Every structure is written in structure tokens, then in C-alpha cells.
């Protein structure tokens, strides 16, 4: 019977491109809710918390 180490299956490390949708909380300083909405819509503000992944989708395997 072969030694246990001889039965070990050889594996490889694979990489993939993944599309990840995150839900994050962003903050902006404004004088009113309307101003805050306008600032957010124009790309203003900054991320307050890193958020959670809400969807992960496999795009393609990198096997080069």
C-alpha cells in the first residue's frame, strides 16, 4: 500500500475576477437634506463605514 504522503492530491491556487456590490454608509456635511442629496448625487461626501457585501458574482477565471 502506498505511503499516505504519496496519496496527497496536488492542488493549484486559482484567481478569479469577481464583481462585488457593497452597501456602504457615506457622510456629508450640509445645511439641509436637499443640499445633502445634491452633494451625494454629485459625488460629494466620504465613506463612513466600509459596509457589507450584498452580492458577489463570478466574472471570469484567471488561468494564465
Image (cartoon, grey):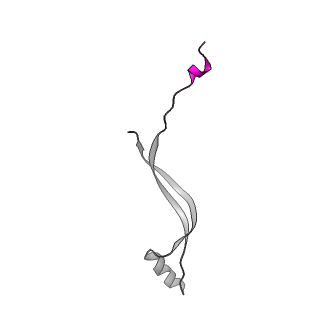
Give the residue displayed 50% in from the left and 53% down from the top: 56
Is 4 contained in the magenta span? yes
Residue lying at the far left in this picture: please name it: 64
> What is the number of callouts on the image?
0
Image coords of residue 31 (percent x, y): 54, 87
Give the residue displayed 59% in from the left and 14% down from the top: 2
Quadrant hosting residue 9: top right
Magenta stretch: helix, strand or loop mostly: loop
Give the residue displayed 57% in from the left and 24% down from the top: 8
Nearer to the camera, 6 or 30: 6
Is 34 contained in the magenta span? no
Nearer to the camera, 54 or 28: 28
Quadrant hosting residue 61: top left
Please tell me whether residue 58 is drawn above or below residue 43 in the rendered image: above
Image coords of residue 63 (percent x, y): 40, 39
Residue lying at the far bottom in this picture: please name it: 31
Quadrant (top left/top right/bottom left/bottom right) for the C terminus: top left
Image coords of residue 48 (percent x, y): 57, 70
Please tell me whether residue 3 is drawn above or below residue 32 in the rendered image: above
Q: Which region of the structure is painted magenta?
A: 1-11
Give the residue displayed 45% in from the left and 76% down from the top: 41
Quadrant hosting residue 1: top right
Amino acid at each position: 500500500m502506498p505511503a499516505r504522503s504519496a496519496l496527497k492530491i496536488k492542488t493549484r491556487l486559482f484567481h478569479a475576477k469577481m464583481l462585488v456590490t457593497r452597501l456602504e454608509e457615506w457622510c456629508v456635511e450640509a445645511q439641509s437634506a436637499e443640499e445633502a442629496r445634491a452633494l451625494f448625487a454629485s459625488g460629494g461626501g466620504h465613506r463612513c463605514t466600509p459596509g457589507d457585501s450584498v452580492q458577489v458574482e463570478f466574472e471570469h477565471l484567471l488561468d494564465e
